[in-house]
Image (tube, helix red, strand yellow):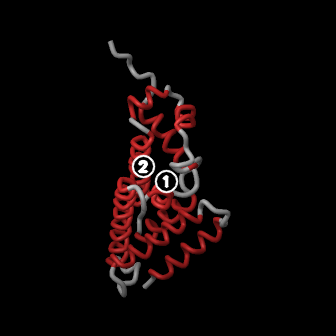
Amino acid sequence: MARSKEFEEKEVLDKAMRLFWEQGYEKTSMTELVEHMGIHRRSLYDTFGDKHSLFLKAMDRFDDKISAALARGVKRSKTASEALQFIFSFMIDGDEDSPAGCLMVNSAVELAARDVEVDNKATKAFTTAEQLLKEIILWGQRESEFTSTYNAEELAGYLHNVWIGLRVMARTSASKEKLHRITHISMKLLEV
């Protein structure tokens, strides 16, 4: 008779995701994962596979959680400017009690050049982010909040580059005030 799992899969996956987010893939050992997740090594392998499979599942979990948080924030926004400001603030401040930076950005920098699966997941997440920005820009252009001088897709590419830069700088000792100044300039560039 098979034993029932003594843990909630999403909860322990969140713990692994956080550890990978804080330390990166290479620096995180299986021993640390087992300890941090609070499960037996055999349960980790049975449920998630090897370290690489667990990492890919953690990337998916991260993408799902961040996408949902961004969608909620954008949906609550009354204007495109407010939606974009929400995104920028989220990139700088994140959720309370979350590590600085971005698991997708960190993973792309650490592994994408030599790991096709990580590259595919990061590229997919980046494409989705640019599409979200494009939709917000089009909204702002329709409402005459944002300039129509530039194509929405080009502006989305530019703003996504700012987004990634913010996520990288958030992991450094750069002040949040500096990062907010960068977003302010980016918002000014969109004005009519």
Contact? badges 2 and 1 (CB < 8 Å): yes
Residue at the image point whose x is 55% and y is 58% from the top: 101
User: With respect to residue 106, does 60 lie above or below?
Assistant: above
Q: Which residue is mark 2?
A: 59
User: With respect to residue 94, does 179 lie above or below?
Assistant: below
Q: For the residue carrying disc 2, how many other residues have a C-alpha within 10 Å: few (<14), some (14-19), or many (20+)?
A: many
Q: Position of residue 167 (x, y in %)?
A: 53, 62
Q: For the residue carrying disc 1, how many other residues have a C-alpha within 10 Å: few (<14), some (14-19), or many (20+)?
A: many
Q: Position of residue 118 (x, y in %)?
A: 39, 54
Q: Residue furthest top?
A: 1
Camera-side residue: 13 or 93?
13
142 lies left or right of 101 = left
Camera-side residue: 100 or 143?
100
Dot 1: element = helix
Residue at the image point whose x is 41% and y is 65% from the top: 78
127 lies left or right of 91 = left
Label 2 amino acid?
A: Met
Residue at the image point whose x is 38% and y is 48% from the top: 60
